[in-house]
Amino acid sequence: MAIDTSNTVKPGNPLTSRSNGSAAASGRSDTTARGKESATGASPDSVVLSAEAQTMHKLENAIQSASDIDSEKVDAIKQAIAEGRFEINAERLAEAMLAQDELLN
């Protein structure tokens, strides 16, 4: 593969959008190209989200702003442990652990 290091724009080259000279020399600028795109209603810089995507974004923000720890539940468990009322159901705990394991496999 040969690489052209002369860095010159050759007229009629299909890989370039320029013709003889630069855009400034020909009186054109990038803003005229953007103006044509925006006149047709399609802009390469804009994004329109679907209703589902907007809902997902709102839910994601709500989840991120929610606390990871239920402090009321933690306080209730601490109090139950301190008073000796906290009971652990080993069978229920084992079933929950097995159910989680099945979800991962």
Image (tube, rainbow, N blue to C red):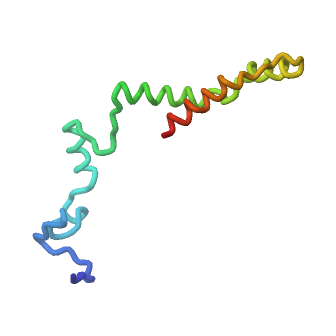
Q: Nearer the viewer, residue 46 or 34?
A: 46
- Residue at the front extreme, as displayed: 91
Image position of 80 (left or right of 43) = right
Relative to 79, does residue 14 appear above or below in the rendering?
below
How far across and how far down the image is residue 72, in percent?
75, 19
Question: Is 2 on the left or on the right of 76, as rendered?
Answer: left
Q: Quadrant of the N terminus?
A: bottom left
**Looking at this view, is 104 or 3 the one in front?**
104
Q: Position of residue 90 (x, y in %)?
A: 71, 25
Q: Residue at x 36, y 25 (%)?
A: 51
Number of numbered discs visible in the structure rendering? 0
Q: Quadrant of residue 12?
A: bottom left
Point 64% across, 29% down: residue: 94
| Residue 22 in the image, given as x and y percentages of width and height | 23, 67
Residue drawn 85% across and 22% down?
Answer: 81
Q: Residue at x 39, y 30 (%)?
A: 53
Q: Is residue 93 toward the left or the right of residue 101 in the image?
A: right
53 is higher (above) or lower (below) than 42: above
Residue closest to the far left: 12
Above or below for 40 versus 75: below
Coordinates of residue 38 in the picture (x, y in percent) = 24, 40
Quarter of image, res 6: bottom left
